[in-house]
Image (cartoon, rainbow, N blue to C red):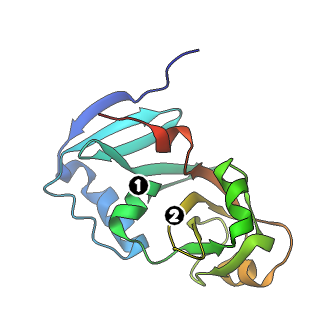
Amino acid sequence: MSVKRLRRRTPLRFKQIRAISDQVESRIGVSLGLSSSFLEEAHFEGTDLILVDRVPKLMCLSNDSTKIWFPTLRGLLDWEVKCHWAEVDHGAIPFLMNGADCMAAGIQESDSKIGVGAPMWIRDEVHGRPLAIGWSLMDGDSMRQSSKGKAALTVHWVGDELWSLDSQ
């Protein structure tokens, strides 16, 4: 069994990722404050990452022809993102922790700004903490109103290899 680790780690200057930083800031409505951080680009299991002070905080999500930079779960925790979320009940959490896609039946509340095919994150309804990141299959209002079907394709979750990565 091969050890999974970051590959092609390369230091970056902020000006090299200013466009990515601006894109993410406008999408999530939060200042990332990356200009004084130690930045690196890296590759992990088919995903391009940006490490901030040696922690993977941005990932490039790919969906067919679309490539969008979005915070990782650790990025969501640090930057306290308040949009593009869906909130699930306690019963959905064990499934999400195993990498399952998010079903509409488990969603209690969602951000109406979520569009179909957009990156989003899933949080628990009690604490509001990030559980998973994925691609929406419904808009935010439909997620809230629907009681069946898949609401999101999960790509990164608490406990997966990227979450567990020791990047030091």
Q: Residue at x 84, y 77 (%)?
A: 147
Residue 162 image point, x, y percent: 49, 41
Q: Quadrant of the N terminus?
A: top right
Q: Is residue 98 left or right of residue 30?
A: right
In the picture as drawn, the residue positioned furthest to the left comes out as 36
Q: Quadrant of the C terminus?
A: top left
* Label 1: which secondary element: helix
* Label 2: which secondary element: strand
Instruction: Please name the residue that numbered disc 2 is placed on.
Output: 130
Residue 72 sits above or below residue 54 on the image: below
Whether residue 72 is visible here, answered yes or no, is no
Q: Residue at x 40, y 63 (%)?
A: 77
Task: Judge by depth and name the residue closer to the eye, 86 or 136.
Answer: 86
Q: How far is disc 2 from disc 1 in space, using C-alphas?
A: 9 Å
Residue 49 image point, x, y percent: 40, 43
Instruction: Please name the residue that numbered disc 1 is placed on.
Output: 74
Query: Circle 1: is it few (<14), some (14-19), or many (20+) Cα within 10 Å?
Result: some
Residue 104 sits above or below residue 160 on the image: below
Tags 2 and 1 touching, CB below 8 Å: no
In the rendered structure, find residue 100 and report the number of the disc placed on it: none
